[in-house]
Image: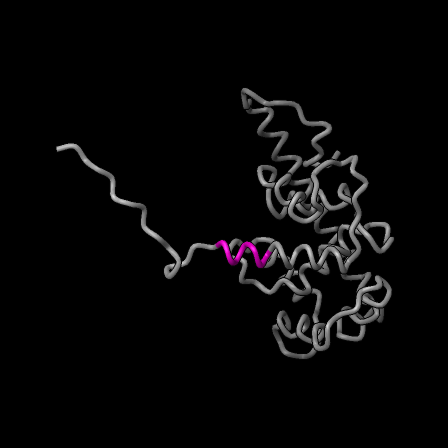
Amino acid sequence: FWPCDRRNLAPVHNVSVSAMASAAARERYARKNEQDELERAFRTIDKKGDYKIDADELHQLFLALGHKPKRGEVDDMIWEVDEDCDGCLSWVEFQTLYTRGRDDKTGYEPRGLFNVVEFVMSDKQGQGFITLEEAMQIMYLRYGRALLDAQLEEVFGTSDLNSGKILTLTEFLHCLHASQVKQLLNRVTARSYQAPPPTNRRK
């Protein structure tokens, strides 16, 4: 079962060595499965089969998924993560954009193509939409178990597996963009930081 499948999770009061080992094994399984899904996503987008992803292939993907990008959006997605500036993405660049986006805690890494890749990884059957259950593994790896429910609520509006909630690519990108903007606005900076009021000390 998925490492984040709450239907198979029981309350844990005493963390044993065996339980920790089991959690580590589930994490390794999840990471291996993540790599497999990333490779599948690359092959899905790489329609020409030349081991590179260009703007035309992204346009084809969006057309197939019923998503209408804004003018210049596709070119910007490529440009943001095109390390060697050749106008397309190699497999290495594709891996790099994904791992940097996944591990980013600042919210400043480019997320345009990263969010598209997450959708394709979650849409395992190629149906053009993702369900809550399909998204759980990716969200687990991205945010961890402790924040899983909160992030599902943020993107899907619910964390109930029985809700039947689905999202198209357009809806998924809109929800993630709104969530990421909210994250950045709520971030405490040197300019927005307010020191707590001084405490009264007894003399």
- Left or right? Give the position of 62 relative to 176: right
Classify the position of the N terminus by image quarter. top right
Residue drawn at the location 69% of the way across and 45% of the way down: 157
Identify the colour scheme used. Answer: one colour
Q: Main secondary structure of the magenta part?
A: helix
Query: Residue 96 placed where, x, y %?
Result: 62, 62
In the rendering, at what x and y percent does residue 138 appear? Answer: 69, 47
Q: Total label count?
A: 0
| Quarter that holds the C terminus | top left
Q: Which residues are magenta?
A: 180-186
Residue nearest the viewer, comparing 156 with 106: 156
Res. 58 image quadrant:
bottom right
Instruction: List the single residue furthest toward the top.
Output: 14
Q: Is residue 95 magenta?
A: no
- Establish if 193 lies above or below 11: below
Instruction: Report which quarter residue 134 is drawn in.
Output: top right
Please name the residue shown 84% across and 62% down the image: 65
Give yes or no for residue 181 being in the magenta stretch.
yes
Name, please, the residue furthest toward the left: 203
Q: Is residue 189 left or right of residue 195?
A: right
Residue at horizontal 56%, vertical 55%?
A: 182
Residue at 60%, 45% (x, y): give it.
143
Which one is nearer the viewer's eye here, 115 or 28?
Answer: 115
Q: Position of residue 129 (x, y in %)?
A: 82, 53
Residue 18 location in percent, x, y? 59, 24
- Considering only vertical position in the picture, is 63 above or below 117? below
